[in-house]
Image (spheres, helix red, strand yellow):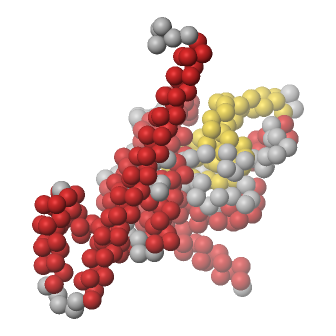
Amino acid sequence: MSNLQNTDRNLLQELAKIIEQGKKQVAVQVNSTLTLTYWNIGKRINDNILQNKRADYGKQTINTVASHLVEEYGRSFDAKNLRRMMQFADIFSDFEIVAPLVRQLSWSHFLLLIPLKNNEIRIFYAQKSIDSLWSKRELKRQIERKVYERTEIAKIQNSITIQNNNLETTVFKDPYFLDFLGLKDGYLEKDLESAIIKELENFILELGAGFSFIERQKRMIIDGRDFYLDLLFYHRKLKRLVAIELKLGEFKASHKGQMELYLKWLNRYEKETDENSPIGLILCAEASSEQIELLEMHKDGIMVAEYWKDLPPKEKLEKKLHSILIEAKERMEIKQISEEN
């Protein structure tokens, strides 16, 4: 390329860009066509087995068909993979739903979605994968970190906040997993903040898609005094500033007044004309559910969530999150009953 003139070099670069984009489009089209082929194979086998009532017919058919397909088309069509295709067509049975998904998700994505408990969870992770451009590895990581369950907990606990402020219900989580910060026992608030800044990419990944970091220790001058907000973010989809305060211990009622002050200041001096009102997220080592309910923090657009610096083993994590989710649902039901009465 050293012998090329500038105009020729620019042309060559543009042509190379077009070719690379074309390669990506071809790869996407090939992937979606292949995944849809797997769905059609699975559906055809399922329909065939359904028509025959004999219990042993399905197993015999799959093994027989697989041996011929492997000989003709390779190991991608062995008995094990045919069963996956059958599961795929059975679980994602609605073609109107599966057709747009296969244009944006790979077969590897679907192999991670198929074992999930129900369709609501599968669609949640499918949509998140599309919106956040998750790779297969990242989708696996997010499933293991129970993003669906934590989003559901936050959605229930902040249901009135979300409703009153027209917030997207899947933006926030509770708790947030900050195990990647590597915090030792006895850490201070400044240690927590410094660790977040050091691991900012991972922290934003934990927050979720749409968050952009703006400033650390945002200075606010009120009545001639300096006040400092721990972290300031912006959420593109919500079109809002998101103020984040970090607290070492459990939630205290005084935290509400502090966050209210920060949000009022941001609304007056930082909010652009085309933006929605700022909202606040208080991250505590331990939430105080009853205090949060009594304070009705939702009316001021403030959410509270726990953060966990250490994660328990997988089984304990599942049980703990399940227990939190059940408790949140029970509190919500009790509140709805009391409001009706």
Closest to the observer, 308 or 160:
160
Q: Residue at x 22, y 89 (%)?
A: 52
Q: Residue at x 64, y 48 (%)?
A: 281
Using residue 207 as the reference point, say whether residue 143 is left or right of it.
left
Count of picture labels:
0
Residue 73 picture quarter: bottom left
Looking at the image, the residue that sits furthest to the bottom is 53
Residue 265 picture quarter: top right
Using residue 275 as the reference point, say whether residue 250 is left or right of it.
left
Q: Position of residue 292 (x, y in %)?
A: 65, 59
Q: Is residue 61 placed above or below 261 in the rendered structure?
A: below
Q: Position of residue 258 (x, y in %)?
A: 73, 44
Q: Is residue 147 placed above or below 156 in the rendered structure?
A: above
Closest to the observer, 314 or 107:
107
Is residue 177 visible from the viewing direction of this image? no
Using residue 277 as the reference point, say whether residue 158 is left or right of it.
left
Residue 289 picture quarter: bottom right
Closest to the observer, 194 or 148:
148
Q: Residue at x 35, y 64 (%)?
A: 37
Q: Residue at x 45, y 67 (%)?
A: 98
Q: Position of residue 86 (x, y in %)?
A: 29, 72
Is residue 136 visible from the viewing direction of this image? yes
Quadrant occupied by the C terminus: bottom right
